[in-house]
Image (tube, rainbow, N blue to C red):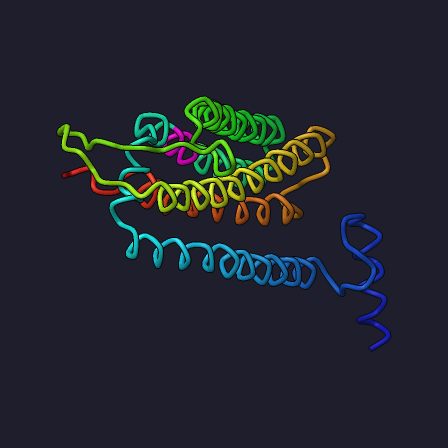
Amino acid sequence: MADSHATAVETAAHNPALLHHFADEQQQKDAASLGMWLFLVTEIMFFGGMFCAYLVYRVAHFNAFAAGSQQLSIGLGAFNTAVLLVSSLTVVLAVNAAQRGKRKQLVVYLVLTVVLGLTFLGVKAVEYAEKFEKHHVPGASFAFTESFDDNGKHIPVNPKEAELFFSLYFAMTGMHALHMIIGCGLFAGLAVLAWKGHYTPGYYTPIENAGLYWHLVDIIWIYLFPLLYLISRHS
């Protein structure tokens, strides 16, 4: 037992990233990974409730939801989807660079991830601005009288039901955007630490865990895009 303790102390002395209450790097990595996966489960439960509420109201008020969806730009939504898919690739490349000890490549991929994240948020800001101009923001100034599908066919709309669609739209995309902002800040901080040589092939757990967070945020958008933007587009 004494020899084991001495070995742990010696390892900690050689690796400043190893916290004192862990016996070795692998135990610390496993604990951090478990904590991240538990956190991701809570995120799935949080967004899962919003998705369930959305699906229930979509079935109950399909015409209004379809009409509201017609007001969203498929082009901008598809562009943002592509941006996030590319950002997932840069995250994977960042983790790979960390594993191989490529510090400069790691920094580049982390910065690219932040740039792509900010690009997504910029496009989302453009979409939100358009909704304010058209008075599609839920509240006293909300206005939605009629809508037409892609073939010019009139869609009967109850304004209150359309307002419900946009309430869910802003709630779901707004929470997603908040997670994107957090992710951008997280990766910016990791890039600074990576530039200072904080991560090595033996220690890159924060980058790996941040990557898991980013992938979850990307997956959530993969579901949001068709659910919000592609309702009854074939009609």
Q: Which residues are magenta?
A: 80-86
Give residue 157's position: percent from left, percent from top.
27, 41
Residue 231 found in image quarter:
top left
Overall secondary structure of the magenta stretch? helix
In the picture, the quarter occupied by the C terminus is top left
Residue 56 found in image quarter:
bottom left
Give residue 31's position: percent from left, percent from top.
66, 63
Front-most of residues 17 and 65: 65
Q: Residue at the location (48% across, 23% down)?
A: 129
Asked if residue 208 lies in the magenta stretch, the reply is no
Give residue 209's position: percent from left, percent from top.
59, 49
Residue 11 placement, left or right of 219? right
Give residue 57's position: percent from left, percent from top.
35, 55
Q: Residue at the location (30% across, 56% down)?
A: 60
Q: Residue at the location (57% across, 29% down)?
A: 114
Asked if residue 85 lies in the magenta stretch, the reply is yes
Front-most of residues 7 and 214: 214
How many numbered marks, from 0 up?
0
Q: Is residue 87 above or below residue 207?
A: above
